[in-house]
């Protein structure tokens, strides 16, 4: 499942991003899930963070106050018992918020 209720509040050169983690995570996944956050300036990824805990907010710093950014948040999980020959990691679809 994807994160829900993604939003961002900008203050000068930083932005606080918040989201919710759905409650319907299948039991086949190890917990906690990893949160993957990517920050894009136009088409260039400027920052990436992977947090190995189920946090529901993050403050992005070092932004240029005159630029817009896209922030993508994904969940990453790994199976408790992966199938032989298949990847253990699974990423959700990313949810995107734009800050101006």
Image (tube, helix red, strand yellow):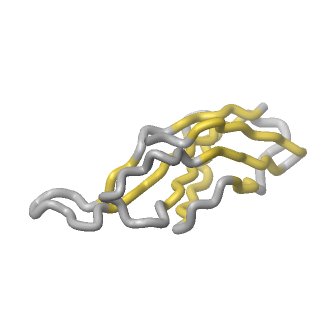
- Left or right: 69 with respect to 52? right
Q: Is residue 43 above or below residue 73?
A: above
Q: Quadrant of residue 48?
A: bottom right
> From the image, which quarter does the N terminus lie in?
top left
Q: Residue furthest right?
A: 12
- Rendered image quadrant of residue 12: top right
16 relative to 46 in the view: left or right: right
Q: Position of residue 76 (x, y in %)?
A: 43, 55
Q: Depth check: 22 or 78 in front?
A: 22
* Left-right relation of 69 to 22: right
- Residue 92 position (above or below residue 28): above
Pinpoint residue 65: horizontal percent, then vertical percent: 85, 42
| Residue drawn where x is 33% and y is 52% of the image | 90
Answer above or below: position of 69 versus 33.
Answer: above
Q: Nearer the viewer, residue 41 or 28?
A: 28
User: Residue 29's quadrant in the figure?
Assistant: bottom left
Q: Residue at x 47, y 61 (%)?
A: 33
Total labels drawn: 0
* Quadrant for the C terminus in the image: top right
Residue 73, image x, y percentages: 56, 45
């Amino acid at each position: 499942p994807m994160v829900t209720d993604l939003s961002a509040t900008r203050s000068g050169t930083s932005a606080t991003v918040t989201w919710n983690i759905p409650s319907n995570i299948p039991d086949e996944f190890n917990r906690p899930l990893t949160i993957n956050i990517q920050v894009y300036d136009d088409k260039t990824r400027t920052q990436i963070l992977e947090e190995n805990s189920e946090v529901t907010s993050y403050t992005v710093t070092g932004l240029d106050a005159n630029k817009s950014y896209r922030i993508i948040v994904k969940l990453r999980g790994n199976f408790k018992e992966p199938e032989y020959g298949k990847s253990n990691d699974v990423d959700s679809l990313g949810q995107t918020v734009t800050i101006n």
